Amino acid sequence: MEAGISSFPPLGQVTQIRGNTIEFFSLLEVDKSRAGDAWEVAVWRSSTDGVWSEKLLQRTRASESPTLLRAPPASRAFLYFRTSFFVSSPLNFTLKFRSGPDHPWRWARDLSGIHDGVVLIEAPQPRSRMGGDLSDIIHGLNPDLRVTAAASQTPHTELWSIEADVDPAVGDQSAYADVDLGTPWGGSLRYFAIIRHGSPWLGPRHSSTSFSLDKDAVVCSFLNHRGKHLVLLGVSGVANVTTLFRSSGAGSVKLHIRNDNGSRSSGLVLAAVGDNFESAIAAVMYHARTVILATRVGHDELSRELQSLSEDVRPEWYENWYDGLGYCTWNGLGQRLSDKKIIKAVEALAKSRINISSLIIDDNWQDIDYRGQDQSQYGWNGFEAEPKTFPLGLKETVLRIRAKHPSIQHVAVWHALLGYWGGISSTGGLAKKYNTVQVNRADSNVNGPITVIAKEDVRRFYDDFYRFLSDCGVDGVKADAQYMLDTWVSAQDRRELTDAYLDAWMISTLRHFSIKAISCMSQAPQILFYQQLPRNRPPLLVRNSTDFYPDVPDSHPWHIFANAYNTLFTQHLNTLPDWDMFQTNHEFAGFHAAARCLSGGPIYITDIPGKHDINIINQMTGPTPRGKTVIFRPSVVGKTIDAYTGYDELSILKIGSYNGRAVTGTPILGVFNISRQSLQELIPLSRFPGVVDSARYVVRAHASGLVTPVVQPSSSNAIIAVSLDTRGYDIFTAFPVTKFDSETNGEVDVANLGLIEKMTGAAAITTSQFELLQTGRVFLDARLKALGVLGVYISSLPDMSIERDFMVTIQGQPIPLRAVSVNTIDNRVLNVDIETAWKKMGLKAGWSNEVEVKVYFDIEYP
C-alpha cells in the first residue's frame, strides 16, 4: 500500500501566518511492517527570489506530536516530523520523503496529485489609510468611474464606493452597460467569487490562475502575495439597477449593469481591502446595508408597518419554528401528492417514533389548470386544494393531521411567489377575483407569457390567501420560485412589480404567520439586497443553495460545498440559511446530517415513508422534558474556513461554527472529504472558529468519541491529524477547560462536553458553570435543552470512584448511580445518562423546558 503524506501548513492551500517563524509539521503514513525504517521527510521551499532550498524535518516525540482522534488502521503506522524556519517573504513549498538515506526521494505531488502549498506572512496591522488611492490596488482603474473613499465599519479595512453611469431604459427595453474596472492587484494569487449559479441560486467559483468567470458574480475577492484581500461587491436593488461582475479575456474585472429605470442611473460597486477575508467582506456588506436603508426613506409607511409587525414576534417563536425536526413531502412522497399520501407519511413517522414538530406540504397540493406542455406553464385556479386528490379540502386534511398528531406544532404549505410555476390561470377563479396582467419571461428554465396578479391587487391577494390558509389550520408557508421576478423581459414589469410583490409577501407573511416562512429560489441580486439585507424586520429563513437531489451521486459533495461557501456571503444578510431537506436512508445521509447540524439552520427530512435511519436522526435530535424533539443548532452559522480553496482541489472541506458566548463558548469544526480519493490533513486547533489563544481546551471527535489531552492552541499537540476516506466526515468540538488545584492530587482539569451522542451536542448546553465549593468539592451547574447522555471531562477520573466521589441531581433530585458511569472509550469522561434517569425517576417538566443537572465530585481523595 502506498505511503501517505500531509502537513501543516498544508499542501495545495494558502496559509497566512503571524510573525516570521513557521512551525512546520508533517505526517507520514506508512505500512506498519516498515515503521522501523529510517524514514526521512524534507520540505522543499522557495521565496520571492525564486531560489529553492530544502530542510530536513526531525522525528517528534509522542508528547509533541499531533493528535489522532480515531483508532489507527491495524496495518498502518503514523510517523510525525517537524521543523521550524525563519521566513521574511511569501514562499511556495512541497514535500518529499524516502525510507532511508540510501533510497530515492519521492515527491508528494507524484503520490497524491496535490500541488505546492503557499505561506503568506500577515503584516502588522497599520492604521487605516482612509482616503488611499484605489488605483494602487486595482491596476488600470478605469478613470471614467467615480471613486469615493468611505468610512469603514470594520477595523483595519479601507473602503471605497465606485459608481458607473448607465443610460435610461427606453420603454420596455432595459439599458445595459459593460464597463471595465481594472485588474485587482495587477494579478492575484487566488480569487473567490459568488456567482449566479442559475437564475434562482448562488454558487462559488475559485481559481489560482487568471480571473475568469463562467457566470455573472455578485461578489468577488482577490488575495495578493502580501496577504491582502480585496473584496468587490456589486450592489443591486437600488433604483431598479442591477450591478454584477464579469471577467475580460485578459483577466481584468468588468461591471455588467442593467438599468430598468426610465432615467439615467448609476451602477454601484463597493470595494474593501483588509488583512483577512472576513473583515473585508464585512466592510462591504455593512456599508451596503447603509446604502439600502438610505434609499428606503420614501418607504416610511412600509417601514412602520414592518416594525409594528416585528414587535409582535416573540423569542419563543424562533425556537418553535427553527429548532424542531421537520418533514417535507417533496422527495419522500413525489410529485403526485394527495391527502392520503400525506397522512400515511405522518403515520409512518409516528410508528417509527420520529417526533416531527413541523410538516411542510410541498408542491402539487394546489388546484392548477394543467395547460401547456409542462409544469412551468401550469396556472393556479383557486385557493382551495386540488379537489381530486384532496376531496375533503385542505382544512379537513390539516385538521385530521393535527388531531391525530398533536406533536406536529406547525403545518406549512408550498406555493410559488406568483401563485404557481406558470403564474395564475387566466380562466380560473383567481383571475376573475383579482386584476391580472400578462408578462413575458425569458429564462434558461422557462420562457413565454404568463398571467400574474396586477400591482394594485397584490397585497389584497396575499392577504386573502394567507387568511384562507390560517383558517385551514396552516401556520407557515414556503414561498418558492421568487427569482421569476427577475426573468421578466420587460423593464417596466420588473420596475413596477418586483418591489410590490416582495413587500406584499413580507407584510402578509409577518401578519399571518409571524416568522414561519421559508423564502426559496430567491437568490436573485435585487431580492438579496432589497428584501434580505435590511434589518428592520425579523430574520428570514432562506434556502441557501440549489436543491438536494437524492438520485444524483455527484450532487451531494457539491451541495455541502456550495452551502458552506455561499454562507461566506449570506451570513451578512438578515437571514437564517436553510441547507434544504435530505433523506436519512441514503448513502450520503450522515454526510448531509453532519452538515445540517453545523449549518446553524433548520433540519427537515424528506424520507420515503417507513425508510428511516433512526441512528442518524438520534444523532441530530433529542427529546425535551415536555416530549418535543429538538435539534441542536450552534449559535453561529456554519461556513467554510478556507475562502480560497476550490471544489476540485484535493483538500478536506472544513466547516466552522461556534456555540455560546465569546471566550467561554465552544468552537466546532466539521471535516468532509468531497473528493474521489482518501485525504489526510493536519488541522491546528487555532483554526477552529472562536478559539482564544490564552485558553485551554479538550477536543472531542464525534465519530470516535476520543478526546485529546488538555491543550493550548499554540502547543505542538494542539494539531488534529485528520484522515478521511471518500465520503468520510467528522465533527470536532473544542471545549474550554476549567482548572482546579487539589492539595492531594495536583491539577484537575474539567470540561462540560454537552450531549456526547449528538453531532453538535455542545449546542444542547444553555448554561454551564464549574465552581469550587467551600467543602472542597467541585460543582457543575448545567442546563440542557434536551435529554440524552451528558459527558463531563475530568482529568483525574481514572483514579476516582463513582460511589465514593460523585453525586448527581436532575431537577434537584439525586439520580440512581447506575445512570452514572465511566465512558468506555475514554476513561476521563463521565457519562450521565439523563434520559434514562428521567424516565426511571418518573420526572415531569416544570415551568421550564430545560433540564437542570448538577454534578458534585471530590478532587481531594486518598
Image (tube, rainbow, N blue to C red):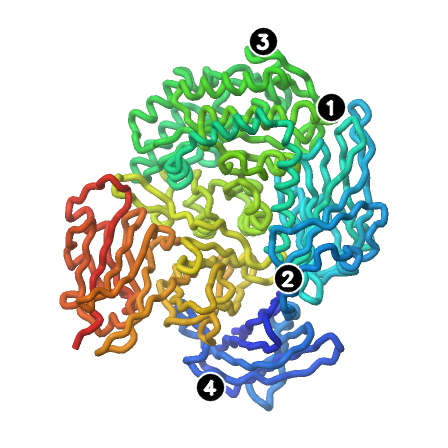
Q: Disc 1 versus disc 4: distance between alpha carbons?
A: 76 Å
For the C terminus, the image quarter is bottom left
The amino acid sitting under disc 1 is Gln
Identify the mark nearer the N-term, 2 or 1.
Answer: 2
Measured as percent of width and height from the top left, residue 684 is found at 50, 68
Taking 675 as reference, is 788 left or right?
Answer: left
Are there few (<14), some (14-19), or many (20+) residues within 10 Å of tag 3? few
- Please give the residue where the numbered disc 3 appears in the rendered image: 432
Count of numbered circles on the image: 4
- Please give the residue where the numbered disc 1 appears in the rendered image: 492
Q: Disc 2 versus disc 4: distance between alpha carbons?
A: 45 Å
Identify the mark nearer the N-term, 3 or 1.
Answer: 3
The amino acid sitting under disc 3 is Lys
* Residue 36 marker: 4
Is label 2 or label 1 in front?
A: 2
- Farthest bottom residue in view: 102
